[in-house]
Image (tube, coloured by chain):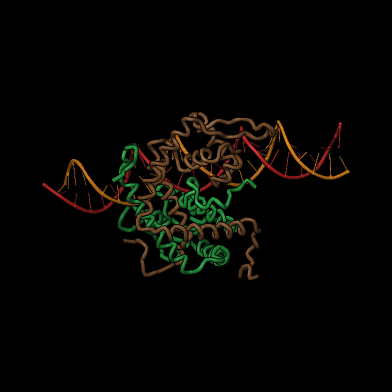
Chain colours: A green, B brown, C orange, D red
Amino acid sequence: MATVDQTHAAPSWRRVEIALIAGARKVAAAFDHRLAPIDLNLNQASLLAFVNDFGESSQTELAEMVGIGRASIGSMIDRLEVRGLVTRNPHPNDRRVRLVNITLDGAALVEKFYEIDAGFQREIRREISREERQHLASLLERLGANVDAILSSPNINQERGGPHA
Amino acid sequence: MATVDQTHAAPSWRRVEIALIAGARKVAAAFDHRLAPIDLNLNQASLLAFVNDFGESSQTELAEMVGIGRASIGSMIDRLEVRGLVTRNPHPNDRRVRLVNITLDGAALVEKFYEIDAGFQREIRREISREERQHLASLLERLGANVDAILSSPNINQERGGPHA
DNA sequence: GCAGAACCGTATGGTGCCATACATTCTGAT
DNA sequence: ATCAGAATGTATGGCACCATACGGTTCTGC
C-alpha cells in the first residue's frame, strides 16, 4: 500500500536512471545474499574469479576490472589476504607493483562460487532472454561512454534555461 | 593493455550483472557531478521532486520510493530540513508519522533540478533510443521481481545443483 | 647521469548506505 | 479496559566506496 501507482508510467521523479541505480543496488544485495555462505561479496568473488582465470595481476589492473578505485581495491585485497585466499608478491622487474595471486584455498572457494553463481544466474535471469542481456550489455557500454563524456566535461554554471543550442 | 579481451564474449568473471552495478554507480556519479551546482545528489533531488509533485508524504513512503531504508531516509531528510528545503509536520491522526512537505525554497530548487535534469538526459541518452530505454525499464522491473524472490527465499545451503524445481 | 613527469600502492578523512535494536504509538483481540 | 503485535521514526555501529595527498619507484628528455 502507498506504493507507487502503476498508472503513472514514467513520472518525472521516477526516471529510468534512478530505477537503474536502485535496481543495481538490489541485484548486488541479492548476490551478496546468496554468497553469504562462503562469506564473500560480489566484488570479492569477481576479483577472485578473475585472478583464478587470468593468473597474477597488479592491483591497478584489478581495480579497473572490478570498476572501483585503487584505494578501495587495496583494502579489499587486504581482507582477502588475511583470510589466505590471495597472496601479494613483488613484481620481478618493477618494485612498485605487487602482483596478486590466488592460493589453493582461494581457488577452492572460486569453485564454490561458480556453483552458487550458476544457481543465481538461473534465478536472476528468469524471464530474461539471452538476447536481452546482450542488448543490456551493449546499452551499458554506450551509457558508460556518455557518462565518461559528462564526467570529463565541466559544469556549465547554471546558465539557466539550459544549453538550448 | 590488460583490458578485457573482446573475444571473450561473456567470461565467467565479467558478468552482465557486474557491469550493471559498476555502470549504475558511474551513472550516479555523473548525475551528482551535474547536480553539484545546486548541492544535491540524485536521491535528494529525486525525493524533493517526489514531494513537490505528490505533496506531503510519510518518511516510510519516501524510503520506498527512493529505494533505500528508513534509517537512511531519516538522516537524508535531516539534512534537507536543516537547509530549509522541506519541513516535518505531525500527522493529524497518527502521532507516529511525520509528514514531509516541501518549502518554497525547496520548490525553487526543484525547478533548477528539472532544468539540469533535462540537459543531463540529452547527454546520457545520446545514442540510446526511446525504445531501448523502455526496454531497459521493463527489464529492470523483471530483474527486480527476481531479486525480491531471491532475497525472500532462504539460502538452500550449498545444495549444489541449485533449486531445480 | 639527472631533474621532472608518470605510475603504483597506501594512508587519511568523509559520505552514504545498511542492519539491528529501541521508544513511541496505533490496532485489534479478548 | 487491557495487552500483544505491528508500524513509524530514531540511534548506533559497521561497511564499502570515493577523493585527495603522499612516499617510493620507474621512465623520459635533456
Q: Is the residue A4 above or below the residue A110 in the image? A: above
* Residue B128 sits in quarter: bottom left
Q: Position of residue A1 (x, y in %)?
A: 65, 47
The residue that appears at 48% across and 33% down in the rendered structure is B106
Towards the viewer: A110 or B156: B156
> Observer-nearest residue: A4 or D16?
A4
The answer to whether residue A117 is seen in the rendering is: no
Where is residue C12? Give x, y as percent. 43, 36
Q: Position of residue A79 (x, y in %)?
A: 50, 51
Please, is residue B160 above or below residue A83 in the view?
below
Depth check: A39 or A56 in front?
Answer: A39
Give the percent coordinates (x, y) of residue B135.
47, 61
| Position of residue A161 in the picture relative to residue A35 (left or right) | left
Indicate the quadrant containing the N terminus of chain B: top left, top right, bottom left or bottom right: bottom left
- Judge whether B48 appears above or below A127 on screen: above
Task: Examine the rendering and report whether any part of residue A27 can be seen.
Answer: yes
Residue at screen point 43% across, 64% down: A135
Answer left or right for A145 relative to B73.
left
Number of numbered discs? 0
- Foreground residue among A123 and A82: A123
Query: What residue is shown at x 65% (from left), y 70% (from top)?
Result: B165
